[in-house]
Amino acid sequence: MMAGDVQPPIGIQERMSISRWSGLRTELIWIYNGHVAPETRNITAEHSTGFWVWLLKEGSVVVKKPGQTWSAKTGQWLMMPSGRAVQSFSANAKILSVHFLCQWPTGENYYDTTLARVWDGANYPALERSALKLHALVARQFPHVRTDFSQQITTYETFMLFQKYFSEWLSHFSRAWTRIDGPLTRSNHTDDRLLRALQILNQTPLSDPFPQASLLAQSGLGRSQLDRLALRDTGVTIREYWECLREQAACHSLSMGSMPVKEIAYQLGFKQPSHFTKWLARRTGDTPQIFRQNNAHYQVGSFNDDIASKPETTRR
């Protein structure tokens, strides 16, 4: 422990098997360190996918949802609440921002962010140090990437270094979250057999066919039994869960980058782009081209993290 690292009392930490913990999906989506661009200072944004956490390096921010208001000033961290919220930064605002995933196989977020949380960075200097270390690696390895790091091509050695730095930051974040009594979700209610099936789906390349044989063999359940468990814990059948994964990936690729529609279709297992177009239209009501037009994101700054849509529209 370095000088200045205050260690408040540790809250109650959940205990479960390593196998169950291994089901958590953790992923860095982007990280940014710099001034908040004028286009994104005052917007209504959607924060349902993953988590957004900001350290205010300069200035301040006010976040509002109906009947609720949170504010953070220089030196404070803020975890954004899930759902739509209005964010208003001061003109001089500078942030260290991390957007990441941490989800159970059911798709449920590990950290409960129904409400925002604000805490003093001075009590957790290792959290900032590890974030800056991670940002330096990302900026060095992917200097021109402004949105999603997951599709970048790199070596195994760099990937492992990337995972090491992200895991280090996430460990410090989790420690801080526990010590400020941040709420967590629980996965204990989920049947282990269903968890195994969901892990298979989450780990299977989306370009592959639906892995029914593996699901039934690894879970030890019949298809109808597996569907009943999936409906109980996720609200959808096991096949629909797979389709939701494909839809999420399609919408992400269309809204966050310029990848050709044909390439997106092939990555999701469609042999013909026309089949992908019909499938997406059934699920979203839009063709790929229209979806991309309606959900285009700003690319603000030289290395932007806070990719936002136009004011008063939805951001991923």
Image (tube, grey):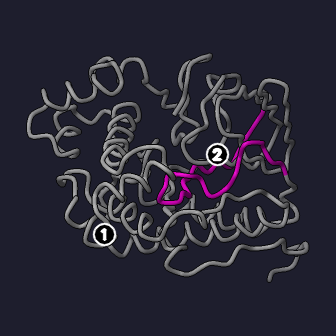
Question: In the image, is residue 265 above or below residue 104?
Answer: above
Q: Position of residue 136 (x, y in %)?
A: 56, 61
Q: Nearer the viewer, mark 1 or mark 2?
A: 2
Camera-nearest residue between 58 and 81 = 81
Camera-nearest residue between 197 and 159 = 197
For disc 1, the neighbor class at 10 Å (few under 14, some 14 to 19, many from 20) is: few
Magenta segment: does it hold 99?
Answer: yes
Camera-nearest residue between 225 and 312 = 225
For disc 2, the neighbor class at 10 Å (few under 14, some 14 to 19, many from 20) is: many
> Residue placed at 28% from the left, 63% from the top?
222
Q: Position of residue 233 (x, y in %)?
A: 51, 53
> Residue placed at 62% from the left, 28% from the top?
45
> Residue placed at 62% from the left, 78% from the top?
16
> Residue placed at 34% from the left, 51% from the top?
238
- Image quadrant where one finds the N terminus: bottom right
- Judged left or right of residue 301, residue 223 is left
Dot 2: element: strand
Snapshot quadrant of residue 229:
bottom left
Q: Which residue is mark 2?
A: 52
- Judged left or right of residue 84, residue 215 is left
Counting the numbered discs, the total is 2
Q: Position of residue 287 (x, y in %)?
A: 27, 20
Q: Which residues are magenta?
A: 92-118
Magenta segment: does it hold 127?
Answer: no
Whole-angstrom CA distance, mark 1 to mark 2, is: 27 Å
Q: Earlier in the sequence, mark 1 or mark 2?
A: 2
Snapshot quadrant of residue 160:
bottom left
Q: Which residue is mark 1?
A: 155
Question: In the image, is residue 75 above or below residue 193?
Answer: above
- Residue 298, which numbered label? none
Dot 1: element: loop
